[in-house]
Amino acid sequence: MVNSSMTDIIRQMLGQFNGIKAEIVNHQVWGAPANALVLYLPEPRNVLSGLQGFRKVNAVCNCYMPESLWQVIEDSSYDWRSYPREVVRKALSRQSYLPSKVATLVTGVDMRRLAWDEECYDNIWVQAWVTAGFKHNAMRVGRDKAGGIENNGHFDKVGTINTIVVTNACLSQAAMAASFMTITEAKVIALQEADVRSSYNPKLQATGTGTDQIIVVSGRGNKCNFIGGHTMLGELTARAVTGATLKAIKNQINNNQYYD
């Protein structure tokens, strides 16, 4: 671990992965200790985010919001959407990145339970970075009924499976959109193989949670317009996502904390 110049921030390098620097940043936001995964891109990259849409960014961040802050947001003027902006302001203070130049996700999963996987073929590589919270709101979409998460003025516990996929392939916007299908199918395979059941009807296998999110990061290598299961890029993406999701599920079930 490396202490930053700000006394409440501790940076923990995970390594360099094909030019992408990955670290977990331990910090405090609104008085609560938390952490975030930050992937620093070697140059501005196009991304597609289920939360923020299409944009060009310098970094991608998966922000852990601890349970102690859930009620703070509900009982105060804080907006949960301001939380990732505050994380970016603090965690990426050395880079002075604007929030608009960072793609962010929010989860209730501690980054110490993060998992990742990489698949390669010839000159193409795909990385998947996954956190898997599912114990309280795993569901089988379309079979379990939709419902709010507010209960008598309080937020119930919720989980989220966040998936970040990074590749060196140069993806068209259509390919980035299509990748969400491949990524989701791969996530479902992991849930099936781990036999994760619906929190609402344990007889049903879960397909995800009601708050899962995806970010896809394009590269600057060979141009690719297709990312379905019949393509090598689709196969690499699916294998990486399934592998990382299975590891993340195991970490969450066993409360593994690999990065203390």
Image (cartoon, rainbow, N blue to C red):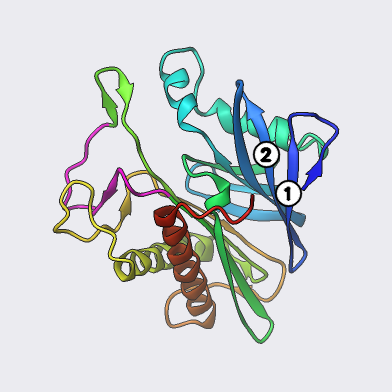
**Residue 57 visible from this viewpoint:** no
N-term mark: 1 or 2 = 1
- Crowd tier of the residue under label 2, counting other residues whose Cα lies within 10 Å: few below 14, some 14–19, many 20 or above: many
Query: What is the quadrant of residue 191 in the picture?
Result: bottom left
> What residue occupies the far right of the structure in this picture?
5
Q: Is residue 256 shown left or right of residue 195?
A: right
Q: Amino acid at mark 2?
A: Asn
- Residues shaded magenta: 133-148
Q: Taking 230 as reference, is 251 above or below it?
A: above
Q: Secondary structure at mark 1?
A: strand
In screen coordinates, is 70 left or right of 92?
left
Determine which residue is flagged by label 2: 26
* Dominant SS in magenta: loop
Quick check: is 237 in the magenta stretch? no
Residue 200 - label: none
Q: Give coordinates of residue 233: x percent, y percent.
A: 54, 77
Residue 119 found in image quarter: bottom right
Could you give the CA–CA distance between mark 1 and mark 2, rounded to whole angstroms? 8 Å
Contact between marks 1 and 2 (CB within 8 A): the answer is: yes
Q: Residue at x 49, y 25 (%)?
A: 69
The residue located at (64%, 33%) in the rendering is 87
Q: Is residue 88 above or below residue 132?
A: above
Q: Which residue corresponds to the image point at 39% horizontal and 55% vertical from the top-left?
A: 253
Q: Identify the residue at image location x=55%, y=52%.
A: 257
Residue 220 appears at what percent x and percent y?
A: 72, 67
- Left or right of 14, for residue 246: left
Q: Pointer 1: what residue?
A: 12
Mark yes or no: residue 89 visible: yes
- Report the number of numbered marks: 2
